[in-house]
Amino acid sequence: MHFKIYAMPDTTIRSNTEVVLIGAGIMSATLGLILKELQPDIKIEIFERLDKAAAESSDAWNNAGTGHSAFCELNYTPEKKDGSIDPKKAISIAESFEVSRQFWAYLVEQKKIFSPENFIKSVPHLSFVWGDKNVEYLKKRFEALQKNQLFKEMVFSTDFSQLKEWMPLVMEGRDSSEKVAATSMALGTDVNFGELTRSIFNYLDGLEGVTMHFNHEVQKLKQREDKTWRIKITDLATGQKRKSYTKFVFIGAGGGSLPLLEKADVPEGKGFGGFPVSGQWLKCINPEVIAKHQAKVYGKASVGAPPMSVPHVDSRMINGEKQLLFGPFAGFSTRFLKNGSYSDLPLSIQRDNILPMISAGIKNIPLTKYLIQQVRQSPEDRIEALREYVPTAVAEDWVIERAGQRVQVIKKDEKEGGILEFGTEVITTADGSLSVLLGASPGASTAVSIMIDLVGRCFKEELASTNWQEKLKIMIPSYGQSLNDNPVLSNEIRKNTAAVLKLNN
Protein backbone atom coordinates (compact mmCIF):
# COMPACT_ATOMS: atom_id res chain seq x y z
CA MET A 1 0.00 0.00 0.00
CA HIS A 2 1.36 3.42 -0.96
CA PHE A 3 0.53 6.63 0.89
CA LYS A 4 0.87 9.98 -0.77
CA ILE A 5 2.46 12.62 1.48
CA TYR A 6 1.19 16.12 0.86
CA ALA A 7 3.32 19.06 2.01
CA MET A 8 1.36 21.59 4.01
CA PRO A 9 1.29 24.91 2.15
CA ASP A 10 3.60 27.50 3.71
CA THR A 11 1.27 30.34 4.63
CA THR A 12 3.98 32.50 6.19
CA ILE A 13 3.73 36.14 5.07
CA ARG A 14 7.12 37.48 3.97
CA SER A 15 8.18 41.10 3.65
CA ASN A 16 11.33 43.00 2.75
CA THR A 17 12.03 46.33 4.37
CA GLU A 18 14.92 48.64 5.27
CA VAL A 19 14.12 49.23 8.95
CA VAL A 20 12.27 47.17 11.56
CA LEU A 21 11.28 48.83 14.85
CA ILE A 22 10.29 46.46 17.66
CA GLY A 23 8.07 48.06 20.33
CA ALA A 24 5.66 50.96 19.76
CA GLY A 25 6.91 53.31 22.47
CA ILE A 26 8.39 56.81 22.42
CA MET A 27 11.84 55.56 21.32
CA SER A 28 10.61 53.71 18.18
CA ALA A 29 8.23 56.58 17.36
CA THR A 30 11.06 59.12 17.58
CA LEU A 31 13.54 57.03 15.58
CA GLY A 32 10.96 56.15 12.92
CA LEU A 33 10.02 59.78 12.40
CA ILE A 34 13.62 61.06 12.36
CA LEU A 35 14.56 58.45 9.72
CA LYS A 36 11.46 59.22 7.63
CA GLU A 37 12.27 62.95 7.74
CA LEU A 38 15.88 62.34 6.73
CA GLN A 39 15.01 59.84 4.00
CA PRO A 40 11.33 60.08 2.94
CA ASP A 41 11.42 56.93 0.76
CA ILE A 42 12.76 54.66 3.54
CA LYS A 43 10.62 51.54 4.22
CA ILE A 44 9.80 50.86 7.87
CA GLU A 45 7.90 48.04 9.61
CA ILE A 46 6.85 48.39 13.25
CA PHE A 47 5.88 45.41 15.45
CA GLU A 48 4.14 45.75 18.84
CA ARG A 49 2.90 42.83 20.93
CA LEU A 50 0.09 44.83 22.59
CA ASP A 51 -3.02 46.16 20.83
CA LYS A 52 -2.02 49.85 20.93
CA ALA A 53 0.98 52.16 20.99
CA ALA A 54 2.64 53.46 24.18
CA ALA A 55 0.84 51.03 26.50
CA GLU A 56 3.93 50.13 28.57
CA SER A 57 6.81 52.43 29.68
CA SER A 58 5.64 55.40 27.58
CA ASP A 59 2.12 55.46 29.06
CA ALA A 60 1.31 58.41 31.32
CA TRP A 61 0.64 56.26 34.41
CA ASN A 62 3.83 54.28 33.83
CA ASN A 63 6.45 57.03 33.88
CA ALA A 64 7.14 60.19 35.85
CA GLY A 65 6.12 62.48 32.97
CA THR A 66 8.45 65.09 34.37
CA GLY A 67 9.96 66.07 31.13
CA HIS A 68 13.11 65.01 33.01
CA SER A 69 15.04 68.20 32.48
CA ALA A 70 17.11 67.75 35.67
CA PHE A 71 15.58 70.92 37.14
CA CYS A 72 14.28 69.15 40.24
CA GLU A 73 15.62 65.56 40.31
CA LEU A 74 18.30 65.53 43.01
CA ASN A 75 19.74 62.15 41.95
CA TYR A 76 21.24 63.85 38.86
CA THR A 77 23.47 66.06 41.04
CA PRO A 78 25.39 63.72 43.36
CA GLU A 79 27.48 65.06 46.24
CA LYS A 80 31.12 64.08 45.82
CA LYS A 81 33.32 62.81 48.68
CA ASP A 82 34.79 66.29 49.15
CA GLY A 83 31.26 67.71 49.63
CA SER A 84 31.13 69.48 46.25
CA ILE A 85 28.29 68.95 43.78
CA ASP A 86 28.86 67.39 40.36
CA PRO A 87 26.47 69.15 37.90
CA LYS A 88 27.66 67.33 34.72
CA LYS A 89 24.81 64.82 34.41
CA ALA A 90 22.15 67.45 35.16
CA ILE A 91 23.55 69.80 32.49
CA SER A 92 23.69 66.98 29.92
CA ILE A 93 20.07 65.94 30.62
CA ALA A 94 18.83 69.57 30.53
CA GLU A 95 20.60 70.01 27.17
CA SER A 96 18.98 66.81 25.83
CA PHE A 97 15.54 67.91 26.95
CA GLU A 98 15.96 71.19 25.03
CA VAL A 99 16.75 69.09 21.93
CA SER A 100 13.50 67.14 22.46
CA ARG A 101 11.56 70.41 22.79
CA GLN A 102 13.00 71.66 19.49
CA PHE A 103 12.03 68.46 17.68
CA TRP A 104 8.47 68.51 19.09
CA ALA A 105 8.12 72.20 18.14
CA TYR A 106 9.27 71.35 14.59
CA LEU A 107 6.61 68.59 14.39
CA VAL A 108 3.89 71.01 15.51
CA GLU A 109 5.04 73.77 13.12
CA GLN A 110 5.13 71.31 10.21
CA LYS A 111 1.62 70.09 11.16
CA LYS A 112 2.83 66.52 11.61
CA ILE A 113 1.32 66.51 15.10
CA PHE A 114 -1.35 68.83 16.47
CA SER A 115 -2.50 70.39 19.76
CA PRO A 116 0.74 70.47 21.79
CA GLU A 117 -1.35 71.27 24.89
CA ASN A 118 -2.50 67.62 24.79
CA PHE A 119 1.00 66.34 25.52
CA ILE A 120 3.00 69.16 27.15
CA LYS A 121 2.08 71.76 29.77
CA SER A 122 3.97 74.29 31.87
CA VAL A 123 4.35 73.16 35.49
CA PRO A 124 6.99 74.57 37.89
CA HIS A 125 9.70 72.08 38.95
CA LEU A 126 10.64 72.28 42.64
CA SER A 127 13.17 70.46 44.81
CA PHE A 128 12.21 70.41 48.49
CA VAL A 129 14.24 69.32 51.53
CA TRP A 130 14.27 69.70 55.30
CA GLY A 131 16.93 69.38 58.03
CA ASP A 132 20.29 71.20 58.28
CA LYS A 133 22.32 68.75 56.18
CA ASN A 134 19.81 68.59 53.32
CA VAL A 135 19.28 72.36 53.28
CA GLU A 136 23.05 72.81 52.99
CA TYR A 137 23.15 70.26 50.14
CA LEU A 138 20.33 72.00 48.24
CA LYS A 139 22.04 75.39 48.56
CA LYS A 140 25.29 73.92 47.19
CA ARG A 141 23.34 72.27 44.35
CA PHE A 142 21.65 75.58 43.53
CA GLU A 143 25.03 77.39 43.46
CA ALA A 144 26.56 74.69 41.21
CA LEU A 145 23.65 74.76 38.75
CA GLN A 146 22.48 78.34 38.67
CA LYS A 147 25.69 79.67 37.15
CA ASN A 148 24.95 77.53 34.07
CA GLN A 149 22.89 79.06 31.25
CA LEU A 150 20.25 76.30 31.27
CA PHE A 151 19.61 76.76 35.02
CA LYS A 152 20.01 80.51 35.38
CA GLU A 153 16.27 80.95 36.04
CA MET A 154 16.53 78.76 39.16
CA VAL A 155 15.49 80.41 42.44
CA PHE A 156 16.50 79.18 45.93
CA SER A 157 14.66 80.00 49.14
CA THR A 158 14.56 79.04 52.83
CA ASP A 159 11.74 81.52 53.50
CA PHE A 160 8.70 79.64 54.83
CA SER A 161 6.20 82.12 53.36
CA GLN A 162 7.89 81.97 49.93
CA LEU A 163 7.73 78.16 49.98
CA LYS A 164 4.06 78.40 50.98
CA GLU A 165 3.42 80.45 47.84
CA TRP A 166 5.25 77.93 45.63
CA MET A 167 3.60 74.80 47.07
CA PRO A 168 0.72 75.54 49.49
CA LEU A 169 -0.31 71.88 49.86
CA VAL A 170 3.20 70.76 50.84
CA MET A 171 3.60 73.57 53.41
CA GLU A 172 0.09 73.34 54.92
CA GLY A 173 0.18 72.02 58.49
CA ARG A 174 3.99 72.22 58.67
CA ASP A 175 5.79 73.72 61.68
CA SER A 176 7.11 77.14 60.58
CA SER A 177 10.18 76.74 62.81
CA GLU A 178 11.29 73.69 60.80
CA LYS A 179 14.47 74.16 58.75
CA VAL A 180 13.29 73.87 55.10
CA ALA A 181 14.54 74.88 51.65
CA ALA A 182 13.39 74.65 48.04
CA THR A 183 14.50 75.56 44.56
CA SER A 184 12.03 76.47 41.83
CA MET A 185 12.25 76.45 38.04
CA ALA A 186 9.17 78.12 36.60
CA LEU A 187 9.94 76.82 33.12
CA GLY A 188 9.43 73.18 34.03
CA THR A 189 6.97 71.05 32.07
CA ASP A 190 4.70 68.04 32.43
CA VAL A 191 4.86 65.71 29.42
CA ASN A 192 2.34 63.01 28.59
CA PHE A 193 4.58 60.67 26.60
CA GLY A 194 1.69 58.31 25.85
CA GLU A 195 -0.21 61.08 24.01
CA LEU A 196 2.92 62.25 22.22
CA THR A 197 3.86 58.72 21.11
CA ARG A 198 0.38 57.98 19.77
CA SER A 199 0.34 61.33 17.88
CA ILE A 200 3.66 60.50 16.21
CA PHE A 201 2.52 56.99 15.25
CA ASN A 202 -0.79 58.35 13.88
CA TYR A 203 1.25 60.55 11.55
CA LEU A 204 3.79 57.82 10.65
CA ASP A 205 1.07 55.27 9.94
CA GLY A 206 -0.34 57.50 7.20
CA LEU A 207 2.98 57.73 5.34
CA GLU A 208 3.89 55.65 2.34
CA GLY A 209 6.39 52.88 3.16
CA VAL A 210 5.42 52.63 6.86
CA THR A 211 3.52 49.55 8.11
CA MET A 212 2.38 49.10 11.71
CA HIS A 213 1.48 45.71 13.18
CA PHE A 214 -0.20 45.53 16.60
CA ASN A 215 -0.74 42.22 18.48
CA HIS A 216 2.43 40.96 16.79
CA GLU A 217 5.13 39.31 18.90
CA VAL A 218 8.71 38.84 17.69
CA GLN A 219 9.74 35.23 18.30
CA LYS A 220 13.21 35.04 16.74
CA LEU A 221 15.88 37.27 15.20
CA LYS A 222 18.77 35.95 13.21
CA GLN A 223 21.50 37.74 11.30
CA ARG A 224 22.15 36.14 7.93
CA GLU A 225 25.48 35.80 6.13
CA ASP A 226 24.85 38.94 4.05
CA LYS A 227 24.46 40.86 7.38
CA THR A 228 20.71 41.41 6.90
CA TRP A 229 18.27 40.19 9.55
CA ARG A 230 15.48 37.63 9.39
CA ILE A 231 12.80 38.21 12.01
CA LYS A 232 10.09 35.67 12.81
CA ILE A 233 6.85 37.14 14.13
CA THR A 234 3.48 35.72 15.24
CA ASP A 235 0.17 37.55 15.01
CA LEU A 236 -1.19 36.94 18.53
CA ALA A 237 -4.79 37.53 17.40
CA THR A 238 -4.84 35.02 14.49
CA GLY A 239 -1.73 32.85 14.88
CA GLN A 240 -0.54 33.97 11.41
CA LYS A 241 3.27 33.63 11.02
CA ARG A 242 5.37 36.32 9.35
CA LYS A 243 8.98 36.70 8.32
CA SER A 244 10.47 40.14 7.85
CA TYR A 245 13.83 40.63 6.12
CA THR A 246 15.60 43.88 6.87
CA LYS A 247 18.92 45.73 6.84
CA PHE A 248 18.46 47.39 10.24
CA VAL A 249 16.66 46.46 13.48
CA PHE A 250 15.94 48.69 16.46
CA ILE A 251 14.68 47.05 19.65
CA GLY A 252 12.93 49.64 21.83
CA ALA A 253 10.64 47.31 23.74
CA GLY A 254 11.19 48.60 27.30
CA GLY A 255 11.53 45.64 29.65
CA GLY A 256 11.08 43.33 26.64
CA SER A 257 14.35 44.49 25.06
CA LEU A 258 16.69 42.26 27.08
CA PRO A 259 15.07 38.91 26.09
CA LEU A 260 15.11 40.05 22.43
CA LEU A 261 18.78 41.07 22.68
CA GLU A 262 19.52 37.57 23.99
CA LYS A 263 17.61 36.03 21.05
CA ALA A 264 19.63 38.14 18.58
CA ASP A 265 22.75 36.36 19.92
CA VAL A 266 25.30 39.06 19.05
CA PRO A 267 28.72 39.40 20.78
CA GLU A 268 27.89 42.97 21.90
CA GLY A 269 24.93 41.63 23.90
CA LYS A 270 26.90 39.13 25.98
CA GLY A 271 27.01 39.63 29.74
CA PHE A 272 23.99 41.93 29.98
CA GLY A 273 21.36 41.14 32.58
CA GLY A 274 18.31 42.92 33.95
CA PHE A 275 16.97 43.71 37.41
CA PRO A 276 13.22 44.43 37.38
CA VAL A 277 11.72 47.09 39.65
CA SER A 278 7.96 47.62 39.84
CA GLY A 279 6.16 50.70 41.11
CA GLN A 280 2.95 52.06 42.61
CA TRP A 281 1.58 55.58 43.02
CA LEU A 282 -0.69 57.04 45.64
CA LYS A 283 -3.30 58.86 43.52
CA CYS A 284 -5.44 61.61 45.01
CA ILE A 285 -9.20 61.32 44.45
CA ASN A 286 -10.27 64.50 46.28
CA PRO A 287 -10.76 67.35 43.71
CA GLU A 288 -10.26 70.04 46.40
CA VAL A 289 -6.83 68.64 47.32
CA ILE A 290 -5.86 68.20 43.64
CA ALA A 291 -6.74 71.86 42.96
CA LYS A 292 -4.38 73.08 45.74
CA HIS A 293 -1.21 71.78 44.06
CA GLN A 294 0.30 73.01 40.80
CA ALA A 295 3.93 71.87 40.74
CA LYS A 296 6.26 68.90 40.59
CA VAL A 297 7.92 68.73 43.99
CA TYR A 298 10.85 66.31 44.24
CA GLY A 299 12.57 65.26 47.46
CA LYS A 300 15.63 63.20 48.34
CA ALA A 301 15.59 59.45 47.74
CA SER A 302 15.98 57.04 50.67
CA VAL A 303 19.33 55.29 51.06
CA GLY A 304 19.51 52.37 48.62
CA ALA A 305 16.52 53.53 46.54
CA PRO A 306 16.71 53.28 42.74
CA PRO A 307 16.52 56.65 40.91
CA MET A 308 13.00 55.93 39.66
CA SER A 309 11.86 55.91 43.30
CA VAL A 310 12.73 59.52 44.15
CA PRO A 311 9.62 60.69 46.07
CA HIS A 312 7.61 63.43 44.43
CA VAL A 313 4.26 65.20 44.80
CA ASP A 314 3.30 65.54 41.21
CA SER A 315 0.68 67.63 39.43
CA ARG A 316 -0.10 65.91 36.11
CA MET A 317 -2.52 66.13 33.19
CA ILE A 318 -3.62 62.64 32.15
CA ASN A 319 -6.35 62.05 29.54
CA GLY A 320 -7.44 65.67 29.86
CA GLU A 321 -7.87 65.53 33.65
CA LYS A 322 -5.73 67.12 36.32
CA GLN A 323 -4.24 64.43 38.56
CA LEU A 324 -2.18 64.49 41.75
CA LEU A 325 0.22 61.63 42.45
CA PHE A 326 2.71 60.79 45.17
CA GLY A 327 5.42 58.17 44.96
CA PRO A 328 6.43 56.04 43.31
CA PHE A 329 6.75 53.25 45.85
CA ALA A 330 9.15 50.65 44.50
CA GLY A 331 8.54 46.95 44.53
CA PHE A 332 9.95 43.76 43.15
CA SER A 333 8.39 41.53 40.52
CA THR A 334 10.06 39.00 38.23
CA ARG A 335 8.12 40.46 35.28
CA PHE A 336 10.03 42.63 32.81
CA LEU A 337 6.86 44.36 31.58
CA LYS A 338 3.58 45.33 33.22
CA ASN A 339 1.94 42.93 30.74
CA GLY A 340 4.83 40.46 31.05
CA SER A 341 5.25 37.01 32.56
CA TYR A 342 6.57 36.00 35.99
CA SER A 343 9.11 33.80 34.17
CA ASP A 344 10.77 36.86 32.50
CA LEU A 345 13.60 37.19 35.05
CA PRO A 346 14.45 33.46 35.42
CA LEU A 347 14.39 32.98 31.63
CA SER A 348 16.75 35.95 31.14
CA ILE A 349 19.52 34.29 33.16
CA GLN A 350 22.08 32.81 30.75
CA ARG A 351 25.59 31.40 31.05
CA ASP A 352 27.17 34.67 29.92
CA ASN A 353 25.30 36.94 32.38
CA ILE A 354 24.93 34.80 35.52
CA LEU A 355 28.22 35.99 37.07
CA PRO A 356 27.61 39.72 36.39
CA MET A 357 24.09 39.32 37.85
CA ILE A 358 25.31 37.56 41.03
CA SER A 359 28.14 40.07 41.43
CA ALA A 360 25.81 43.09 40.99
CA GLY A 361 23.34 41.48 43.42
CA ILE A 362 25.98 41.09 46.15
CA LYS A 363 27.12 44.70 45.70
CA ASN A 364 23.56 46.06 45.84
CA ILE A 365 22.33 44.52 49.10
CA PRO A 366 21.04 47.97 50.30
CA LEU A 367 18.80 48.09 47.19
CA THR A 368 17.49 44.57 47.87
CA LYS A 369 16.76 45.50 51.50
CA TYR A 370 15.04 48.72 50.36
CA LEU A 371 12.82 46.81 47.89
CA ILE A 372 11.89 44.22 50.55
CA GLN A 373 10.91 47.07 52.92
CA GLN A 374 8.85 48.71 50.17
CA VAL A 375 7.04 45.46 49.29
CA ARG A 376 6.19 44.89 52.98
CA GLN A 377 4.71 48.39 53.44
CA SER A 378 1.14 48.54 54.71
CA PRO A 379 -1.35 51.17 53.42
CA GLU A 380 -0.73 53.06 56.70
CA ASP A 381 3.05 53.08 56.05
CA ARG A 382 2.45 54.62 52.63
CA ILE A 383 0.24 57.37 54.05
CA GLU A 384 2.95 58.07 56.66
CA ALA A 385 5.50 58.48 53.84
CA LEU A 386 3.07 60.81 52.02
CA ARG A 387 2.63 62.94 55.19
CA GLU A 388 6.34 63.82 55.13
CA TYR A 389 5.48 65.76 51.95
CA VAL A 390 1.78 66.51 52.48
CA PRO A 391 1.38 66.84 56.29
CA THR A 392 -2.44 67.22 56.13
CA ALA A 393 -3.00 64.10 53.96
CA VAL A 394 -5.88 61.82 54.98
CA ALA A 395 -6.03 58.18 53.87
CA GLU A 396 -9.58 58.46 52.39
CA ASP A 397 -8.31 60.95 49.75
CA TRP A 398 -5.71 58.59 48.25
CA VAL A 399 -5.87 55.26 46.41
CA ILE A 400 -3.19 52.95 44.97
CA GLU A 401 -2.52 53.12 41.23
CA ARG A 402 -0.14 50.64 39.60
CA ALA A 403 2.86 52.32 37.95
CA GLY A 404 5.20 51.00 35.27
CA GLN A 405 7.69 48.17 35.33
CA ARG A 406 11.37 49.06 34.80
CA VAL A 407 14.34 46.82 34.13
CA GLN A 408 17.62 48.28 35.39
CA VAL A 409 20.66 47.20 33.36
CA ILE A 410 23.29 44.86 34.78
CA LYS A 411 26.45 44.73 32.72
CA LYS A 412 29.74 42.89 32.77
CA ASP A 413 32.65 44.78 34.29
CA GLU A 414 36.26 43.61 34.13
CA LYS A 415 37.14 44.92 37.60
CA GLU A 416 33.89 44.44 39.48
CA GLY A 417 32.41 41.38 37.75
CA GLY A 418 29.05 43.06 37.25
CA ILE A 419 27.55 46.50 37.85
CA LEU A 420 23.97 47.73 38.15
CA GLU A 421 23.36 50.73 35.90
CA PHE A 422 20.51 53.15 36.58
CA GLY A 423 20.60 55.03 33.29
CA THR A 424 19.75 54.30 29.68
CA GLU A 425 22.08 52.00 27.75
CA VAL A 426 22.19 51.73 23.95
CA ILE A 427 23.89 48.61 22.58
CA THR A 428 24.85 48.72 18.91
CA THR A 429 26.53 45.97 16.88
CA ALA A 430 29.89 46.70 15.24
CA ASP A 431 28.28 46.66 11.78
CA GLY A 432 25.53 49.07 12.91
CA SER A 433 22.75 46.70 11.76
CA LEU A 434 21.18 46.20 15.21
CA SER A 435 20.62 48.65 18.04
CA VAL A 436 18.96 47.88 21.38
CA LEU A 437 17.82 50.29 24.08
CA LEU A 438 17.97 49.03 27.67
CA GLY A 439 17.34 50.74 31.00
CA ALA A 440 15.07 53.49 32.24
CA SER A 441 15.45 57.03 33.57
CA PRO A 442 15.81 59.68 32.09
CA GLY A 443 14.69 57.75 28.99
CA ALA A 444 11.68 59.33 27.30
CA SER A 445 12.68 62.95 27.93
CA THR A 446 16.01 62.49 26.20
CA ALA A 447 14.62 60.25 23.41
CA VAL A 448 15.49 62.67 20.58
CA SER A 449 19.16 63.01 21.60
CA ILE A 450 19.45 59.25 22.15
CA MET A 451 17.99 58.51 18.71
CA ILE A 452 20.15 61.10 16.90
CA ASP A 453 23.20 59.53 18.55
CA LEU A 454 21.94 56.11 17.40
CA VAL A 455 21.48 57.38 13.81
CA GLY A 456 25.10 58.58 13.95
CA ARG A 457 26.25 55.09 14.90
CA CYS A 458 24.05 53.05 12.54
CA PHE A 459 23.71 55.34 9.51
CA LYS A 460 27.20 56.88 9.59
CA GLU A 461 27.66 57.52 5.88
CA GLU A 462 24.17 58.91 5.34
CA LEU A 463 24.47 61.19 8.38
CA ALA A 464 27.73 62.61 7.04
CA SER A 465 25.93 63.73 3.85
CA THR A 466 25.12 67.43 3.39
CA ASN A 467 21.47 66.52 2.80
CA TRP A 468 21.00 64.78 6.18
CA GLN A 469 23.06 67.41 8.04
CA GLU A 470 20.93 70.25 6.62
CA LYS A 471 17.68 68.43 7.44
CA LEU A 472 18.79 67.81 11.03
CA LYS A 473 19.54 71.51 11.48
CA ILE A 474 16.01 72.33 10.32
CA MET A 475 14.51 69.83 12.81
CA ILE A 476 16.86 70.81 15.65
CA PRO A 477 18.20 74.37 15.18
CA SER A 478 20.84 73.89 17.91
CA TYR A 479 22.15 70.65 16.30
CA GLY A 480 25.93 70.39 16.80
CA GLN A 481 26.02 73.27 19.33
CA SER A 482 25.87 73.45 23.12
CA LEU A 483 23.00 75.59 24.42
CA ASN A 484 24.57 75.73 27.87
CA ASP A 485 27.63 77.45 26.33
CA ASN A 486 25.62 79.80 24.12
CA PRO A 487 23.28 82.15 26.05
CA VAL A 488 21.99 84.02 22.97
CA LEU A 489 21.07 80.83 21.08
CA SER A 490 19.68 79.22 24.24
CA ASN A 491 17.34 82.17 24.97
CA GLU A 492 16.19 82.36 21.36
CA ILE A 493 15.44 78.63 21.15
CA ARG A 494 13.63 78.50 24.49
CA LYS A 495 11.52 81.47 23.42
CA ASN A 496 10.64 79.88 20.05
CA THR A 497 9.83 76.42 21.37
CA ALA A 498 7.76 77.92 24.21
CA ALA A 499 5.68 79.91 21.69
CA VAL A 500 5.03 76.90 19.42
CA LEU A 501 4.36 74.46 22.28
CA LYS A 502 2.23 77.04 24.16
CA LEU A 503 4.47 77.07 27.26
CA ASN A 504 5.59 79.73 29.73
CA ASN A 505 9.05 80.93 28.77
Image: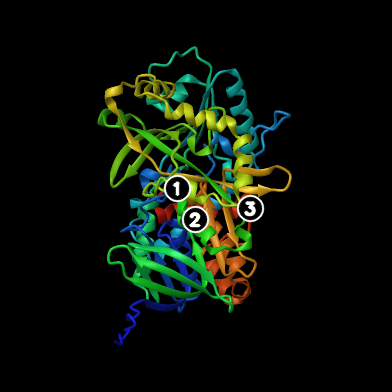
Q: Is residue 446 above or below residue 85?
A: below
Q: Residue furthest front?
A: 1
Mark 3 nearby-residue class (10 Å; few <14, some 14–19, many ≥20): few
* Residue at the (46%, 14%) spot, across then down: 176
Task: Give the residue pinned by disc 1.
Answer: 336
Q: Is residue 198 left or right of residue 177?
A: left
* Position of the N terminus by quadrant: bottom left
Q: Is residue 89 visible?
A: no
Task: Give the residue pinned by disc 3.
Answer: 486
Q: Is residue 299 left or right of residue 323?
A: right
Q: Amino acid at mark 1?
A: Phe
Where residue 276 sits in the image (x, y, percent)? 48, 43
Q: Quadrant of residue 464?
A: bottom right
Residue 259 has which mark?
2
Where residue 298 sits in the image (x, y, percent)? 48, 32
Q: Secondary structure at mark 3?
A: loop
Choose mark 1 or mark 3, whichever is in front. 1
Q: Secondary structure at mark 1?
A: loop
